[in-house]
Image: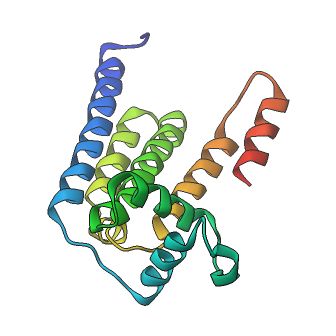
Amino acid sequence: MQGTPGTVRAERTLRVALWGSAAFGVLHLLALPMMMTFDGAEYARLARSFGGSFFAEWDYGRTPLYPLCLRLSFWTLGLQPLGAMAPNVLFAGFGIWATSRVVDSAAGPRAALAGVVGLTLYPTFIVYQHSILTEVSSFLMLALLVLALAWQPSVVTRKTAALVTCL
């Protein structure tokens, strides 16, 4: 680590805040209930149909990635609310991390710290993490796209590859 003692302390505080955000995500995953909507029930039904009659039951207005993530979560954690909410909490954690990387490179660790705390404690974001909807995964994809756009690699083809991967 290089820099002034204040910058080193701010970077360390940012890392602690990111770990605290992850711990808070696990805490509210275990403590708060799941919210099921009509769309959420449809995603759960599509997740259960993966591997069997998936294409016969498929609704082509929905992307297959989110039901696939739900299916993997159901396989890992069981067909229960914890298994349904875990992908969204995981997506939120990675999205907060990606956003903090972009803000850290653009405005410094103190601004990134404020963003991590704000996103972690934002009530609407917490509610969406407990809904079986694609909003949190959309946040992750947008955060990864912005991270790829803000990335300054030494070789230009690496940035092109990162952007193609995000799209």
The N terminus: image quadrant:
top left
Q: Nearer the viewer, residue 71 or 22?
A: 71
Q: Give above or below for 84 relative to 101.
A: below
Count of numbered circles on the image: 0
Q: Is residue 138 left or right of residue 17?
A: right
Taking the view exactly as shown, the residue that stands out farthest to the front is 52
Q: Give above or below for 17 relative to 55.
A: above
- The image quarter containing residue 110 is top left
Q: Is residue 25 left or right of residue 55?
A: left
> How was the colour assigned to the protein in this rendering?
rainbow
Q: Is residue 59 among what the camera can see?
A: no
Residue 119 horizontal/vertical position (percent): 35, 56
Residue beneath the point at 18% across and 67% down: 32
Residue 127 horizontal/vertical position (percent): 30, 71
Residue 3 horizontal/vertical position (percent): 42, 13
Residue 108 horizontal/vertical position (percent): 45, 34
Residue beneath the point at 78% across and 31% down: 158
Residue beneath the point at 37% across and 71% down: 128
Taking the view exactly as shown, the residue that stands out farthest to the top is 2
The C terminus: image quadrant:
bottom right
- The image quarter containing residue 124 is bottom left
Q: Give above or below for 66 relative to 160.
A: below
